[in-house]
Image (spheres, coloured by chain):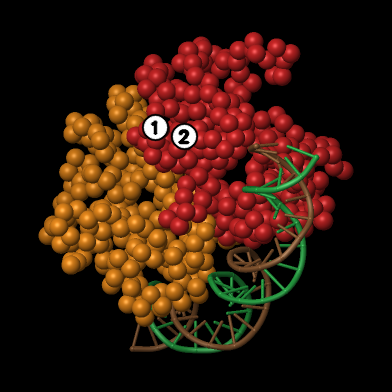
Chain colours: A orange, B red, C brown, D green
Amino acid sequence: MAGSKPHTLQVTCANCGLQRICFPRGLTQQEIVRLDAILQSQPVVGKGEAVFKQGEAARAIFALKSGVVKLCRYDRAGNEIIHTFYLPGDVIGLEALDQPVYQYDAIALDRCNLCRVEVADLDRLAQQMPNLNRQVLQMMRRELELERAHFENVSSRSADQRLAHFVWHIAERFRDRGYAMDTFQLPILHRDIATHLGLTPETVSRILRKFHQQGILTWQRKQVTLHDPCAVRELAGIEAPHASGEGEVCPVCQAHVG
Amino acid sequence: MAGSKPHTLQVTCANCGLQRICFPRGLTQQEIVRLDAILQSQPVVGKGEAVFKQGEAARAIFALKSGVVKLCRYDRAGNEIIHTFYLPGDVIGLEALDQPVYQYDAIALDRCNLCRVEVADLDRLAQQMPNLNRQVLQMMRRELELERAHFENVSSRSADQRLAHFVWHIAERFRDRGYAMDTFQLPILHRDIATHLGLTPETVSRILRKFHQQGILTWQRKQVTLHDPCAVRELAGIEAPHASGEGEVCPVCQAHVG
DNA sequence: ACGCAAACTTGACCTTGATCAAGTCATTCC
DNA sequence: GGAATGACTTGATCAAGGTCAAGTTTGCGT
């Protein structure tokens, strides 16, 4: 993707590298072309800026092409609550299809490139493409599933397990997107992780130090490295999948075993 | 509803008392009649039995007419995690529209009456009724919203606050269904509450005793009474809504003020 | 390059709520 | 109705993680 002439690169849904993980999943090629036609706006949002804010008129949904976005809200005491971090390929603000205003803040954690899709356009399109409704429903269901998985993580586990689970989950998402799962850049503050997991920054710091000393994983600056992915998975309380075939390569962490 | 001849009472969507809070919300009267035609099956599930179980083929969604149902799952160590309690008027198992098998157990906490709607029928119906898709999406979004609200409650609050918030939330749902919000029957074990809130039964017991001593609320057997609803709301960390008009009646808890 | 602000680390201490154990009370099943 | 089972209560103890305070490091703006 990083061609020598990035300024001439025209990315559309039909040739976008995110096609499989972005919202046209399950649509025909023809349908994708049609969807592409309504994707005129491709906003760029700077670090710390909002893609949308709570209370704003909800007129569009967004596909994240690059960067990381947090979805958050504030309680009465002003404390932030972070529900999700979105990675490239994720769709943000689905609730707009169903509500007059956004219910959460979506904040860019670094410079983000997005596709903006007007709800009105999508509604019109949905009348011609029955598949799209199913897609939207599926995305919403996935979002619910993610939130529940996150709740299961935070509701009844130790701080160590929560953090391991979080890192593992992120690593899996990178893997699913075709990137390395054992080392990646993650522009998320430790403070935000702490908030997301219902912990304090101090606790996160201490646990990361411990993990580092144990040789399990390192998270310094924005660089995350899983030195022992299977240990992370184990700590996260996630089952190892059955070995497929020979057992040459660990099917989970892609590390060579045996 | 408790007529003298209950065995002759035929409840359909068109004349069901739950109409407003059940899934036909926003449909025309004509559409409701059509929907009603596919609601042949009205199962009864006994206390402790499953409406559906994780892994089962997901062929239907359900509307709960009476009783309470918990939606839960088990972690690797066998610990139960309870995501939601469904009250009469709620729709259960929406994920069936989108998935081959159920992802959670739905367990009746007392004797439950339900409506069963086959996914296949609903899919067929949706082609004739564009409104239905919107309804379904809205229900899914509400479910997501509820899960997020629950997460916010559990992720960063004290045990007292969690419990107060839970009780307040249930009370509101009773109020929204036209029942008294300050006293109601709730067939939920304290142990299940504890699980739901990420606490232990001992802690729940101790907090309930404290609330009782403080004259805030009582929860004995299945009977819940909010002696000071506004105190509960306050503890739950929920804003009092603006007084509408005179301030004769507290708009939140319907208690007389001033 | 410098300086400031924000992020992160580290240590000492303390609070909340979990754990363990032993009881009482309800409900169900003969 | 009486035993058995499971739900709930109560108390004593303990540990995980929060809080507070004082650092160090990083990154950014000038």
Given the image, on which type of amino acid does mark 2 rest?
Answer: Phe
Which x, y percent locates residue C10?
48, 85
Task: Choose the circle earlier in sequence order: 1 or 2.
Answer: 2
The residue that disc 1 covers is: B58
Chain that bears disc 1: B
Q: Mark on residue B52?
A: 2
Above or below, A8 relative to B90: below
How far apart are labels 1 and 2 at the CA level? 8 Å
Given the image, on which type of amino acid does mark 1 rest?
Answer: Ala
Element marked by disc 2: strand
The mark lying in front, picked from 1 and 2, is 2
Which residue is pictured at 33% across the width and 68% down the height? A231
Which x, y percent locates residue A9?
16, 51
Give the position of the N terminus of chain B as an image quadrant: top right
Above or below, A68 relative to A199: above
Which x, y percent locates residue A10?
18, 47
Q: From this viewpoint, is residue A213 visible? A: yes
Which x, y percent locates residue A113?
30, 53
